[in-house]
Image (cartoon, rainbow, N blue to C red):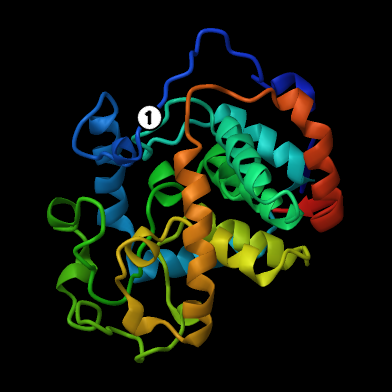
Amino acid sequence: MRVINLGPDLSLAYRPNLTNKTKEKEDYRNFEAGSLKERVFNTYKLMHTNQTVDFVRRKHLEWSNCNHTEMSMMDAIMSLDQLVDESDPDVDFPNSFHAFQTAEGIRREHPDKDWFQLVGLIHDVGKTMALWDERQWAVVGDTFPVGCQFQNSIVFRDSTFLENPDEINPCYNSKYGIYEPNCGLDNVLISWGHDEYLYRVLKFNKCNIPEEGLYMIRYHSFYPWHSHGDYMHLCDDKDLQMLPWVKQFNNFDLYTKVTELPNVEKLRPYYQSLIDKYCPGILKW
């Protein structure tokens, strides 16, 4: 097992070639236009073709034992300097900046909730899988349940599931599929990605982030649920109680994506103190 220490030199904290650009809310998550449209569509096409019940179960076995490497949470965050999310129509800069943007947005609105700020910082850290040779379509993008009918609110629903074998499997293509009504999202297989992976890492390492924060991390990419109201028939009372927290987090996750990049080196000491409080030391990944 490797111990990774990236150090501060990988930070791209100052990039003068990028200038500030203000976006209106309606301009976010535009999957129909823009310079990144083809890249985004191709990523979702691969995702929606290959994310099946069998695939998701295999990924749980592959990643949930956290035996791939060891490193600190800050090193994991800074490793995202090397990653540009191929599913995101809004940004084309390294994911590490988005981490600090989200955290700072939460910090301005919730200066008394340090755990919430930390969730903003680390929510995408599971994307490190893509740096360890996992394919991006199994790491990034909106998530959705497998094992039951794919709902219409899923991005590119009409054109990207045609080759997914679960689409025509009668065990999986009904409203409930393999699930019971109101079984709870904890009992539902969600398409494999960085959300579930980071949730598993935090639980494995016994990090003491509150349950609300764990829900934000685990389901922040589950847009069909938290933004479109689908799959409510699978939710239990706990899911419904946590939904407002996931919705609140989504506002910061989405609307802090601007090209004005934060001074990461200036912010690191404060956020290191939060890491030391909630998920200290060297973690198993």
Residue displayed at 32% across by 63% down:
224
Badge 1 local density, few (<14 within 10 Å), some, or many (20+)? some
Looking at the picture, how far across and down is residue 245, in whole percent?
Answer: 54, 65
Side of 98 relative to 100 (left or right): left
Q: Is residue 69 left or right of residue 129?
A: right
Which percent across, then down, holds residue 88? 38, 38
Q: Amino acid at mark 1?
A: Lys
Residue 91's place in the image compared with 188, above or below, is above
Q: Is residue 232 above or below residue 95?
A: below
Residue 112 or 61: which is nearer the viewer? Answer: 112
Label 1 secondary element: loop
Compare residues 205 and 28 and report the one nearer the observer: 28
Tell me residue 85's x, y (percent): 44, 36
Asked if one can make out residue 6 in the rendered structure from this viewpoint, the answer is no
- What residue does disc 1 label? 23
How many numbered discs, if any? 1
Image position, residue 260 (x, y; %): 53, 22
**Residue at the extreme top:** 17
User: Which residue is at 28% across, 85% downward?
Assistant: 176
Q: Is residue 106 visible?
A: yes
Name the residue: 66% across, 71% down: 211
Q: Residue at x 22, y 82 (%)?
A: 175
Pick the residue in front: 148 or 33: 33
Is residue 124 rendered to the left or right of residue 168?
right
- In the picture, measured across the screen, residue 130 lies left or right of residue 271, that is left
- The quarter holding residue 174 reads bottom left
Q: Is residue 213 above or below residue 39?
A: below
